[in-house]
Amino acid sequence: MKHVVHNGWEIEFRRNIHMYCHSLTASKQCMELHIPCEDTPDGYLGIWPYDLDIPESRYLDLIVALRAWA
């Protein structure tokens, strides 16, 4: 398990919690998000933040952090 901070978001990643699925959590202030992610057929990590029910400004802020983390 590795904790890192990008753009004010604390990001925690744990590999292979179930077969090819991983645990990706991002926390900032009082918000903690569990972001779906899994291995792709091409060998990359696919991150699926699209269905998070958060305001657009917070979503865009999170995307900046995830890009820096990736």
Image (tube, grey):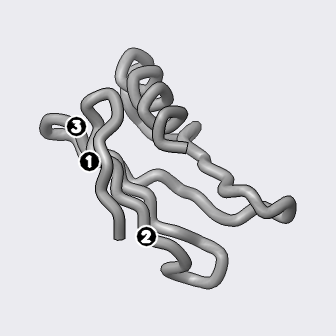
Q: Which residue is mark 1?
A: 32
Q: Mark 2 = which residue?
A: 14
Q: Quadrant of residue 42?
A: bottom right
As measured in the structure, the alpha-carbon distance from the residue carrying label 2 to the one carrying label 1 is 15 Å
In the image, is 68 to the left or to the right of 3?
right
Q: Quadrant of residue 5?
A: top left
Q: Select label 3 or label 1 by which is in front.
A: 3
Crowd tier of the residue under label 1, counting other residues whose Cα lies within 10 Å: few below 14, some 14–19, many 20 or above: few
Residue 23 percent location from the top left of the image:
45, 66
Q: Is residue 60 above or below residue 66?
A: above
Which residue lies at the image location 42% right of the left edge and 36% below the top edge?
A: 53
Write down the residue under mark 3.
28
Type of amino acid under label 3 = Lys
Question: How far is mark 3 from mark 1, CA to CA?
Answer: 7 Å
Q: Earlier in the sequence, mark 2 or mark 1?
A: 2
Report helix, strand or loop for mark 2. Answer: strand
Quadrant of the frame with the N terminus: bottom left
Q: Secondary structure at mark 3?
A: strand
Tell me if residue 70 comes above or below residue 65 in the rendering. below
Image location of residue 36, percent across then percent down? 53, 56
Residue farthest bottom in this picture: 19
Q: Amino acid at mark 2?
A: Arg
31 to the left or right of 52: left
Q: Position of residue 47 (x, y in %)?
A: 60, 49
Residues 56 and 63: in front is: 63
Mark 2 vs mark 1, foreground winner is: 2
> How dense is the environment of label 3, judged by Cα within 10 Å: few (below 14), some, or many (20 and up)?
some
Task: Tell me which residue sits at (14%, 39%) in the image.
Answer: 30
Nearer the observer, 32 or 66: 66
For the C terminus, which image quadrant?
top right
Question: Is label 3 or label 2 in front?
Answer: 2
- How much space separates mark 3 and mark 2, taking CA atoms? 18 Å
